[in-house]
Image (tube, helix red, strand yellow):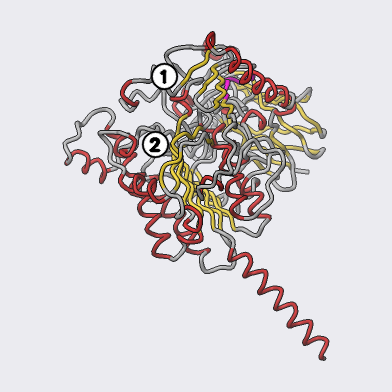
Amino acid sequence: MRYLLVLTVTLLFFSCAEKTVLKSKPNVLVILIDNQGYYELSRNGNEIVQTPRIDALSTTAVNFTDFYAPPFCSPSRSALLTGRYALRAGIHNTVGGVSILHKDEITMADILKKEGYSTGVFGKWHLGSSYPYAPKFRGFDEVFVHGGGGVSQLGDYYGNNHIDATYSHNGKFVKSNGFSTDVLFDEAIKYMDGKKRSDEPFYCYLTTPAVHFPTNRHPETTRRLLDRGVEDSKYMALYSMIENVDDNIGKIMDYLESSGLKENTIVVLASDQGVNDRGAPMHRSGEFQNRGLSFDEKHHVYCMIQYPKLTDKNPGDNDKLTGMVDVLPTILDICGIEEPLNLDGESLKPLLVGSSDWNDERKLIVQCPRSRVRKKWENTAVKYKKWRLVDGKELYNIENDFGQKTDVAGDYPEIVKELTNTYETFWNSLAPAESLISAHILGADEAPEIRLVGMDWYQGDAPWTQQGLVNRKSQGKWRVHIENDGKYQFELRRYPREKIMPIEAVSASIKIGDVEAKVDIDKADSDAILYLELKKGSYDMITTFKDPEHTESKDGWGANFVHVSYLD
């Protein structure tokens, strides 16, 4: 009896001790705003929009003024979640099969979940929607997201915009009420509020589809802008979305304060990419030349990190060269979690406390080929102190030439050589491109049914928006991996399941490797069902609808959506 009593007390002690340790770990809140430019903040000189709550956070947090992200959504998210350059994960575009985070990459959610954290994602994912790439397979317990790469894009719920959108909540579609940013911040607060009473620390990844296109006017902030005398122009929707984001930053920071979570919560607020193609007059003093993906204008983003136990010692602006790849190692360092050895980022913890223990010789590489095939030096910048080596050819000194207008490569050959060597080392360290193609896994026990979307065709066309569904021309291939031998059912659709519309074809076919099937259908049918007996292995998969009565479709077009079920 005495032995049992001692054992019981011992087990209780260690159980309580474990809970105490978990509860003492910092909570993590990462907020990523989509496509908001550095100069779309009033603190950074914008004279139209007002962002008082973000401005205020920049003074209590450490505000990184020389912070860079990959251009475009998927590469930036990949860098944030893995601490590694996006090309290592096979990501170099936002569509076309190369916006999917490779299955071998380890995410922030994977690591924190293993350490006892509850994990939730709210909003935009854009790193793959099938198995094993969807957020529920990448370490997230709670998933409240829209589809595709943005609201109203091909993979999103049909008909969505920023108002009253339908989201996927843990695999089930739910209708929301309100503007996307308001809805997502409310869901994130509800999640954090539920976790504050538990023994688990939380990791909340809140990533808005705003202020990316399509833009919709937020009624309250639009009224506020008009009352201030802002001209009612084609940019009013964008302005209203920016100010609504700011309102919600205030709401969530007020929640952390009132709930008692502020002192033990790491808050990261950043934009995912710079702006060079929006068209709105948002660039600093017209100094940028709007030249594209290799220049600072497309990479320069705002980033603020607050963790009162550290940042209260050294708040305000920090001008060290930093980037999106640094977010993961920073969080792991603060949380006392050992980081993987293969990271490209560096922990910013020394800068959060004002320490001099920082590598001023560090170099950052930003590259987004913006195509299916990665090419050496294509759309590349190597950043080092005041220097920018662009595409391996042009060198700029941004201290004297902020707009990057004067190439000084001929004057500083030793700098060009040093930065070239840095890039060559990186490029030579990349895995073979073929090994980074993300195959959709069919027939896995974890996902016996999955949906494939045409935006992930890795060869052929790259359909992007729902507006393109009216066309009957696009065709492409998915790379798939058959996990188990057996019989598979394929449901081919032109429109998604939630939009019952005719395919307007008279036949449908599918081919995986050398195995194929065909079925005749009525032009009024909204789907076509086919079956294949398949062997385990990796193959190309192509689907074809045909309608000989229309010349534009004489060669056939592909199914935009395919639901795959493993039968036996």
Does 549 appear above or below 236? above
Please state the extent of the stretch shown in magenta in the rendering: 367-375
* The N terminus: image quadrant: bottom right
Q: Would you identify the image quadrant in which residue 130 lies? A: top right
**Which residue is nearer to you in this view: 165 or 420?**
420
Question: Up-down: is 526 above or below 288?
Answer: below
| Along the line of sight, the residue nearer the viewer: 438 or 259 | 259
Q: Nearer the viewer, residue 509 or 105?
A: 105
Tell me the crowding category of disc 1: few under 14, some 14 to 19, or many 20 or more residues within 10 angstroms, Cα based.
Answer: few
Residue occupying image coordinates x 41% and y 44%: 165
The location of residue 68, given as percent across then percent down, is 50, 32
Locate residue 416, reporting x and y percent. Answer: 59, 16
The amino acid sitting under disc 2 is Val
Q: Residue at x 59, y 12 (%)?
A: 413
**Do we see residue 504 in this rendering?**
yes
Q: Amino acid at mark 1?
A: Asp
**Can residue 562 be seen in the rendering of this structure?**
no
Percent position of residue 89, x then y: 66, 32
Residue designated by label 1: 401
Q: Quadrant of residue 360?
A: top right
Disc number placed over residue 211 in the picture, else none: 2
